[in-house]
Image: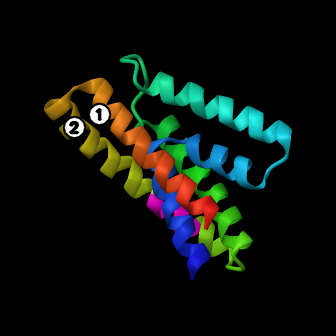
Amino acid sequence: MTGLLLALALGFAAGLRALTPPAAVALAYGGLGWKIVAALAALVELVFDALPIAPSRTGLRGLVARLASGAVCGGIVASEHAASAVAGAAIAAVAALAGTYGGHAARLRAIAAIGGIPAALAEDVVAIGLAAVAVTR
């Protein structure tokens, strides 16, 4: 059960930031090369996401990336906790969908209330926090 809940958290985080869960998984379970590549990719995504030229997360490419990221990472973390990798992937993919659309709606409200950069940073904190909790339990 724990593995599936952690998969859910990683999936939701993937809906917010597609590359943060793979970075967290790589940092927790991967070799040095994967750790470096994944961490750099996640950092680039965090910076790029705050720019006005960033594409919509609800567009086809962004949505597919988030679902795939969530599913792969959810499957890995579930199997690390003796749960079904397939169930973890499925739960994480659904959670990524929720994170994508829920995060988009929350981000729009936050932008109106506190501005674009603070809203992006707040979303970054949530995504990083969820991913960190999921891989350190």
**Colour pattern:** rainbow
Q: Residue furthest left?
A: 113
Please state if 99 lies on the left or on the right of 85 as rendered. left
* Rendering quarter of residue 64: top right
Residue at x 41% of width, y 48% of height: 126
Quadrant containing the N terminus is: bottom right
Residue at x 72% of width, y 79% of height: 82
Given contact means CB atoms under 8 Å apart, are the residues at marks 2 and 1 in contact?
Answer: yes
Answer whether residue 57 is magenta in the image.
no
Q: Residue furthest front?
A: 136
What numbered label is drawn on residue 119? 1
Q: Residues within 10 Å of mark 1 (few under 14, many from 20)?
A: some
Residue at x 54% of width, y 42% of height: 18
Reading the image, the residue beneath label 2 is 110
Please state if 72 lies on the left or on the right of 130 as rendered. right
What numbered label is drawn on residue 41? none
Q: Mark 2 or mark 1: which comes first in sequence?
A: 2
* Rendering quarter of residue 104: top left
Q: Amino acid at mark 1?
A: Ala
Q: Is residue 2 above or below residue 34?
A: below
Q: Predominant secondary structure in magenta?
A: helix
Q: Is residue 104 above or below residue 45?
A: below
Quadrant containing the C terminus is: bottom right
Alpha carbon separation for disc pair 2 and 1: 5 Å
- Give the percent coordinates (x, y) of residue 56: 39, 31
Residue at x 76% of width, y 34% of height: 36
Please state if 39 lies on the left or on the right of 56 as rendered. right
- Give the percent coordinates (x, y) of residue 17: 49, 41
| Magenta-colored span | 90-95
Q: Amino acid at mark 2?
A: Ala
Nearest to the observer: residue 54 or residue 135:
135
